[in-house]
Image: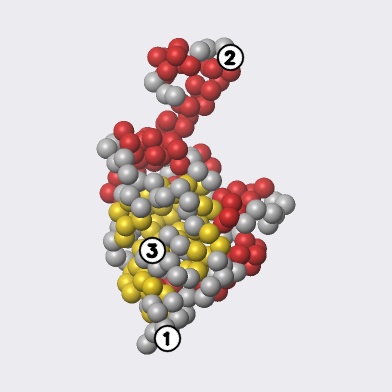
Amino acid sequence: MMRWNNEEEMFFAMKEKLYTPVVGDILDTMGYSHQFLPPDIRPLPALAPGYGVADSQEEDHRWKLAGFACTVLEHDVFGQPQKPFGLLTEALDQLKANEIYVATGAHNSALWGELLTTTARMRGAVGAVLDGYTRDTPQVLGMNWPVFARACWAQDSSIRTSVCGFRCPLEIGQVTIHDGDLVFGDIDGVVIIPKDIHIQVLEKALIKAEGEKTVRKAIESGMSSTEAFEKYGIL
């Protein structure tokens, strides 16, 4: 039985009650064992330590993201392209509410920055996941809008990178990502939940998260991990 009435409540429950390890565990039990993006794709605050904000709610927002994938395919170019950035502006301008810009395919420049973040936010998108680099780091962090990337790098994309398609299947590391898949990220990484099973995965993950709290309390009260595992089947 669903524990939410709409997408907004679903995303709130994900950010408040779930974390990527428990979601990954559930995917494993369902036979989806290759759903985590490479471990060096990290939330921007982890890539730029020292740029903090005082408000704990804002800080948590910058470390977690949840939304539906808008897949974007890029490629490296060498020299002045016929159309700078390729289809980048078109990809940005068609973003929808509760979507996450997920891009791969180019590695000669930054794929993200301040104005792209501004555009995506104004479109109602809720994050970006880049199999590559991001720049304008202080400005992006100042918007308190989650960006995950491999590193920060200032090199511009206009003469080096071109968006060649969007809303198409992607591969990042061991994961095949389809447009509309559910994307969930936190300090431990980014996991992709296939769109056809995301309701079942989240329901099971919420149950497991509650069970893990019970097991922790039992161990803190003196139960051994062996006893706890035998009783609860959770470790």
Residue shown at the point (50%, 64%) measured from the top left: 133
The residues tagged by marks 1 and 2 sit, at their Cα atoms, a distance apart of 66 Å
**Kind of residue sitting beneath label 2:** Ser
Q: Which mark is residue 221?
A: 2
Badge 1 or badge 2: first in the primary sequence: 1
Q: Is residue 27 visible?
A: yes
Residue 90 makes an appearance in the image: no
Which secondary structure, mark 3?
Answer: strand
Secondary structure, mark 1, is loop
Q: Position of residue 182 (x, y in %)?
A: 38, 52
State the residue lying farthest toward the right: 54
Which residue is disc 3 drawn over? 104
In front: label 1 or label 3: 1
N-term-proximal mark, 3 vs 2: 3
Three-letter residue code for mark 3:
Thr
- Please state the horizontal and vertical placement of residue 219, each as a whole percent of the image: 54, 17
Look at the numbered discs 1 and 3 and tell me whether their residues touch, using CB distance below 8 Å.
Answer: no
Element carrying mark 2: loop
> Local crowd at mark 2 within 10 Å, few (<14), some, or many (≥20)?
few
Determine the residue positioned at 33% across, 36% down: 28
Q: Is residue 156 above or below residue 172?
A: below
Would you say 70 lies left or right of 158 here? left
